[in-house]
Image (cartoon, helix red, strand yellow):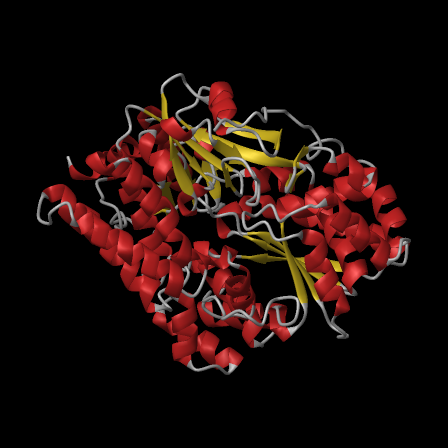
Amino acid sequence: MTISYQLKRADFIFKNQNDWEDVLSKSINRTPQDLINELISSELKGRGGAGFPTGLKWKLTAEITDSTKYVICNADEGEPGTFKDREILSMVPFKVLTGMAVCGHVIGAKEGYIYLRGEYFFLLPELNKVIREFEYYCKEIKFDFTIRIFMGSGAYICGEETALFESMEGKRGEPRNKPPFPSNYGYMGKPTVINNVETLAHTYTIFKYGAKRFYDLGVQYSRGSKLFSVSGDTPKPGIYELELGMSLADFVEEFGDGDTKAVQVGGASGFLVPRKRFNETAIGFQGKLVGISLPTGGSMMLFNSSRSMFNVLDNYLEFFREESCGQCTPCRVGCQQLLKGIKAVKRGEKNTKYLDKLLRLTETMKLTAKCGLGQSVANSFSSIVENFREEMIY
Amino acid sequence: MYPVSELIKNLADQHGRNRHNLLPILQGVVEQEKYLSEYSMIEIARELDLPASEVFGTATFYSFLEYKKMGKYIIRICKTITCSMKGKNQILLAIEDMLKINVGETTPDGVFSLLQTNCLGFCHKAPAMLVNNEVYTDLTPEKVREILNSYLKKQKEGGSHDN
């Protein structure tokens, strides 16, 4: 099965932001219903990785009646191999702020927050300056909306939306049970829209050019363009805006070093695709009829044949073991045991059938862990162990 | 530089004394002191009228809120996959060799602490590290020695300019 979708470059995100005043004032003169319809017809899905339809998210929050609501921009970009959000915030911050303000208008929120990861502290002075300018303009047009930055302090799990709320509330960043979802019960228990930086930047494109322009990019179920953070064994690491739906084979053709053995799609919590499956894998959201479709927050890490997949998995598991919040047992103990387990197999202390036990453990984690972190360890673990079993053993 | 109790009071005045103001206050103390001492945490608890255990529990959750005494410059080397593939260990060895400390340790003069951290988001410019809030990318052993020398020079000149 071969996918025919080709790699196509796009250029929307980093295109000039100089008309933000115009986009903002025009958008807030439209009705919330009109804006929601525009977003829904664009079929924009969340660009943080999970891919929830953005228009629906805004709609659900708008429908709740509450005098206090919040808009939060998730800039806790922590997934290994992802670095696009920082670039957006430094190159086109006004697009993100405009997206937040329009969202405020749609759902009826007067306060917005940017949750910025501690590692990006150096962005703060410039970002604060931009926010002051933005708020000044809002005042000028008598639009009541403020934006504050909340700094994270080095915790990957705080990128999980409910852990992020907990963190902003001054607590440990431990994810909450869902439901209730943020649209009902978010920051401070109030209805909250939380969107990834890139998602908000795309709403700008949609409000500026209309939904069709965005919808015309990409393929069915995976509309629009997306930023990809390309790293690893590639001659041209960096950030690229591409239409969704391309085949991984085309991607590797463009970005590989000629010796690409596997690509990790979606960071440590995503999937590893071995060379033999490049042709049948597309990059986009689930639900397409051909081949396997992998969602991604945009992290694309390439590995060439000099890399040991054992080392790769070992590195991921150490990452998860450290970043697991420790709240629920499947994830806390599971990550530790997986790491211990693959080391024991490698050293020959456990026989190779033990790998199957570990695979069953990841299945358990997928079913029982409380949040996306614990549930997604199975993705990279099983895709690496199943495709490179011999490298785990010898 | 304020004494820490005064700093905490100022931070509480600035941010507020509610639970949701806790993180900015903890971060403010770390900004100046580089770490949270038991004393600081108890003071913060008193200022915000929270159990000290809650403050401790929250502070110790976050990897950038150190609770052991740290050097003036905290070096954090990214150890996640791409940096690790692109020679993170050589960078680490160069630093350990130059400063005569291992990961997790602080130089006896209290100038540098050496730590490893998870993905800094500079995979396309790996290997990368943070020195306090400053990012350095595309590191080589030579480059990292130069960088640390510039900090040493700054330190010798008695410069108190943090970043």
Residue B153 rendering spot, x and y as whole percentages: 39, 35
**Tally of numbered tags:** 0
Q: In the shown orientation, is residue A22 left or right of residue A224? A: right
Q: Which residue is pictured at 66% across the width and 46% down the height?
A: A199
User: Which residue is at the front of the view, A117 or A29?
Assistant: A29
Q: Is residue B72 visible?
A: no
Q: Which residue is pictured at 45% across the width and 62% down the height?
A: A371
Q: In the shown orientation, is residue B9 left or right of residue A264? A: right
User: Which residue is at the front of the view, B11 or A62?
Assistant: A62
Residue B152 rendering spot, x and y as whole percentages: 36, 37
Residue B142 rendering spot, x and y as whole percentages: 33, 24
User: Which residue is at the front of the view, A108 or A171?
Assistant: A108
Q: In this view, does A170 lie above or below A301?
A: below
Q: Which residue is pictured at 56% across the width and 66% down the height?
A: A165
Q: Is residue A272 above or below residue A353?
A: above
User: Which residue is at the front of the view, A299 or A246?
Assistant: A246
Residue A366 falls in which quadrant of the image? bottom left
Which residue lies most toward the top here?
A258
Q: Can residue A92 be seen in this view?
A: yes
Q: In this view, does A165 lie above or below A206?
A: below
Q: In the shown orientation, is residue A232 left or right of residue A116? A: left
Residue A210 rendering spot, x and y as whole percentages: 82, 40
The quadrant of the image that shows the C terminus of chain A is top left
Q: In the shown orientation, is residue A185 left or right of residue B69? A: right
